[in-house]
Image: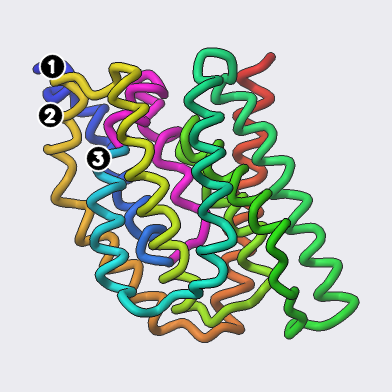
Amino acid sequence: MSGLLSDPWFYAAAIPAVILVGLSKGGFGGAVGFVGVPLMALTIPPVQAAAILLPILCLMDVVSVWTWWGVHDRKMLVDMMPGAVIGIGLGWLTAALVTEEMVRLIVGAVALVFVLRWLYLQFRHGADHAAEPNRIAAAFWGTVAGFTSFVAHVGGPPFQVYALPIRLDPKVLSGTAAIFFAATNALKLVPYFALGQFDTTNLTASAVLMPLAPLSTIAGAWLVRRMRPEIFYPFTYATVAVVAVKLLWDGIAGLM
């Protein structure tokens, strides 16, 4: 334990990772919070990075839900949450079979197709085109988000594949995402504990990094409250595109 906590390279990777995840949790940067595990994995094993981040994510969720309290889309949550529960269960059952590289490759491919589809719709229908809510699609993407969130904390892109085209007000979208991921991360605590991921080393590292969680989350929410939809949505789609390329790169490199 002392070796990890005295390693300057661990902090060089972990501190930016927590800050970026916190900004994303506050609603700024969309799916860019995926970088948390890959950044920390530069210095420690990916599974350990995910275990250290999970308690921090839960604290960020508390701050994020409090920040966006009362601002959410109830129907979207009702339609997506049952699928998320199923996805977490599938992730738990297949934890020994599915690698993080496979998940990154699949999520990256889906996210890239999603962004290309958005660009096509912008060209064909204009910037104000909005999709209609669909319960079946919500259940499917909720399941994918729950599964990928469990395996590698990359539930953001699948959630946004469904949520972004509906074009909610940015504050409502941020509040809905806050509740969705607060619930999924809380559910993940039980299987992570059962899989033996919360040992003394990991929990101590989480506690050391914990003070960064509320500050970065509040900063992300502050930025979202000051962004107009015509800026927020192109910016968020751009971050999803960057995420998609990075996930594809990491997935292919890991499988070769």
Mark 2 → mark 3, Cα distance in angstroms: 11 Å
Tell me where residue 113 appears, x and y as whole percent: 78, 50
Tell me where residue 74 appears, x and y as whole percent: 49, 72
Mark 1 → mark 2, Cα distance in angstroms: 8 Å
Q: Is residue 20 visible?
A: no
Label at residue 1: 1
Residue drawn 58% across and 55% down? Answer: 159
Q: Is residue 221 magenta?
A: no
Mark 3 → mark 1, Cα distance in angstroms: 17 Å
Q: Is residue 127 above or below residue 12?
A: below
Q: Earlier in the sequence, mark 2 or mark 3?
A: 3
- In the foreground, 145 or 78: 78
Label at residue 204: 2
Q: Residues within 10 Å of mark 2 (few under 14, many from 20)?
A: some
- In the foreground, 97 or 52: 97
Element type where label 2 sits in the image: helix
Q: Amino acid at mark 3?
A: Pro
Q: Which residue is mark 3?
A: 55
Q: Is residue 99 above or below residue 244?
A: above
> Does residue 254 appear to the left or right of 8 in the view shown?
right
Q: Earlier in the sequence, mark 3 or mark 1?
A: 1
Specify the segment rendered in magenta: 28-53
Q: Is residue 40 magenta?
A: yes
- In the foreground, 133 or 210: 133
Mark whose residue sits in front, 3 or 1: 3
